[in-house]
Image: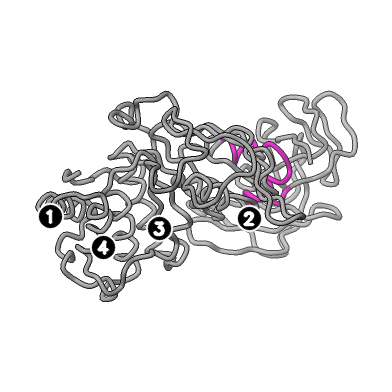
Amino acid sequence: MNETITADAAAARPRAEGAAQGATSRQASAIEMQGLHKRFGRDTVALDGVDLTIEAGEFFTLLGPSGCGKTTLLRILAGLEDADDGRLAIGGRDITEVPPHRRSVNTVFQSYALFPHLSVRENLAFGLKMRGMAAAARHAKVDEIADFIKLGDLVDRRVDQLSGGQRQRIALARALVCEPDVLLLDEPLSALDAGLRSQLQVELLRVQKRLGMTFVFVTHDQQEAMVMSDRIAVLNGGVIQQVGSPREVYEHPANAFVARFMGHDNLYPVTGRQGSRFATALGELSTAQAGEGELLLIRPETLDLLPGEVAGDNHLPAVVVERLYRGSHAEYRLEVGDTTLQVTLNNRGRHLPEVGDRVTVTVAPDDLVTLSE
């Protein structure tokens, strides 16, 4: 653990071939869930038949709105909740009935859950002490993990003297020091400000790739999930809506719920079709392939704007009604006939239309996606 992590965020993101060597590579899959059900009271269904496999060494994210079941699923993995029905295995071992302290799993909570009256060293050593590790070995292990997260000079401070970002690093280190097979993270960055949150996203990803450990991460933040994950499971109403890579979930959502949750506002009912041509409220559009879905998705960053009115296939005359300048890009709301369309444009080296301008929206047939409600 004492090697310095030097990769940048782009290098940290892909899974390295050898990242999952060691303890997590003993089994083909780290976590297997089969038919997990959980109900609270008579009327609240938290999980409704969850089947999911998480591979060893993955950074896997459970994504969804509040109340979708993602935290309940994490707590069942940790042993803090019991499923009403179903099977759970980690590393090929059935742990459905195994108590929390006998699972090779640790959890990092949103609230840090540190002991404020103890020093950083004492917090980090707590789990090792409970396992009966000798004092000299504990001391060496704590120094190693503190250096690994770049807080070695703070080990003798009390945790109530640290910043929020430092406390979150300590919470992560305390979970890692006992070397679990699986680390569970329950929205651990949500209490931090935007700048620190972005920094710790990269640091957390680097740590995971360096160790090759299986991370299961819970968040409701779509951007956070896409930055950090090897794969994402989108949940709603206790049911998995889609599992896939960030690119698959964003570019090819399985249904309208996933599309809307991933921030896609450009969803239009298909009112008629002939082969690969679709009639919508925007007008008639051609797609690369005929689809069976009753909705057409147009991702805002796939659109382009031409000045004035230009005729052509998949060319839509429009009027700019709103522009939000975001620095590297601008977000537009356009009127196309009686409906609206969202467009995102890269700002670099181009003229930006103004509110009130008449423009033509163009979309490539390959960028139109059909899906079901």
- Residue stretch rendered in magenta on the structure: 248-266
The percent coordinates of residue 27 (x first, y second) are 39, 25
Location of residue 56 (image quadrant) = top left
Q: CA distance from mark 1 to mark 4?
A: 14 Å
Above or below, comparing residue 126 to residue 260 in the picture:
below
Q: Nearer the viewer, residue 29 or 284?
A: 29
Which of labels 3 and 1 is toward the front?
A: 1
Label 2 vs 1, first from the N-terminus? 2
Q: Pointer 1: residues within 10 angstroms few (<14), some, or many (20+)?
A: few
The C terminus - image quarter: top right
Residue at mark 1: 135
The percent coordinates of residue 139 (x first, y second) are 13, 55
Residue at mark 2: 65
The percent coordinates of residue 52 (x first, y second) are 57, 34
Label 1 vs 4, first from the N-terminus? 4
Location of residue 15 (image quadrant) = top left
Residue at the left extreme, as displayed: 136
In-image side of 302 versus 27 (left or right): right
Q: CA distance from mark 3 to mark 1?
A: 36 Å
Find residue 198 and name its label.
3
